[in-house]
Image (tube, rainbow, N blue to C red):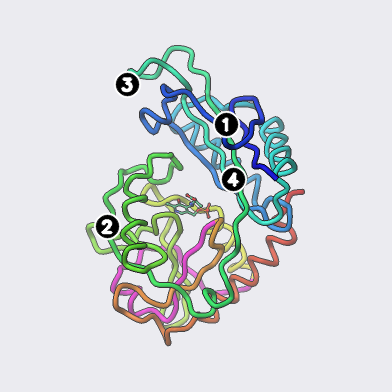
Amino acid sequence: MSRIAYVNGRYVPHADAVVHIEDRGYQFADGVYEVVLIHNGAMVDELPHLDRLDRSLRELRIAAPMTRPALRSVMRELLRRNRIRTGLIYMQATRGVARRDHPFPKNPVTALVMTAKRVSLPSAATVENGVKVISIRDIRWERCDIKTVALLPNVLGKQQAKEAGAYEAWQVDDNGYVTEGTSTNAWIVTKDGELVTRNANQSILNGITRLTLLKLAEREKLRFVERGFTLEEAKQAREAFVSSATSFVTPVTQIDDAVVGNGKAGSVGLGLREAYLAYAAGEGRTP
Ligand code: PDD
């Protein structure tokens, strides 16, 4: 079955899905995006993702591409046409097409594209053994809370991780604190069993998975705190993991050359992963 994409009002075969060369997303990375997990044929945390999309658009003063009910119906139609059970919806909204000039164009028309793709979930071995992350300097701008398509530092960081045989690169600020991964949020469990993730400010993307995990941690009565942690603290931690719509909770068992804990996935991370999967199959889904 061929893949179908949504491009500015039309459903088209993926191979024919094109935008204009003067789309400001292409010229200036002047746009925002969201990635929504599809689990058992349903979207997970759809509404929080759409809330964050609205916020990103507002922060950049880009008009909403359509009303929320219309957007939700496009998402559903795309899933239906692509028959996705496990996968992702990617949506991107840009400040539209205009003759190249840095200031906002007059009367811009927001451009919207959406794709859906199947993905397989991390394997049982990956979950059990955990993954490696490397550390890199955080060279991004001061509005990492906006989910913009300007991802060049993230792309370079992820490539560096890949070349080092690692799953992710943790970005470290000039004070030695881990901000986040290139496409995931970073977590540790300290030696005395406290769950820690960086407080959400303008130096990280406030992950929707992160927010759900905090809610689940509270419900499970885990001891947790939102604060910065240094790379050194992470290397000494009992457990570490990353979170995102695509990796849920993926245990981290190596940071640079340091083995985390006993080198196997830890119980807090695995427990949260289970809780997240139950949430994704239950209250977190919107049909
Ligand atoms: N990335 N931090 C960054 C920099 C991210 O790009 C992402 C998501 C996250 C986790 O956010 P969430 O839990 O809402 O997925 C944190 C998506 C998946 C991507 O770029 O593909």
Mark 4 or 1: in front is 1
Q: Which mark is residue 173?
A: 2
What is the spatial separation of the Cα atoms under label 4 and label 1, in whole angstroms?
27 Å
Reply yes or no: does residue 109 show up in magenta: no
Q: Residue at x 50, y 32 (%)?
A: 57
What residue type is disc 4 on?
His
Q: Position of residue 74 (x, y in %)?
A: 69, 34
Mark 1 surroundings within 10 Å by alpha-carbon count, few (fewer than 14), some (14 through 19), many (20 or more)? few
User: Which element type, helix, strand or loop, lies under badge 3?
Assistant: loop
What type is the residue that disc 3 sits on? His
Q: Residue at x 59, y 70 (%)?
A: 273
| Residue 285 image label | none
Query: Who is closer to the viewer here, 98 or 231?
Result: 98
Residue behind label 4 places its C-beta within 8 angstroms of ligand 1: yes
Dot 1 corresponds to which residue? 16
Front of the two marks 1 and 2? 1
Foreground tag (3 vs 1): 1
Mark 2–mark 4 CB contact (< 8 Å) = no
Q: Is residue 38 above or below residue 16?
A: below
Q: Which residue does the numbered mark 3 point to in the structure image? A: 102
Per the model, the C-alpha gap separating discs 3 and 1 is 29 Å
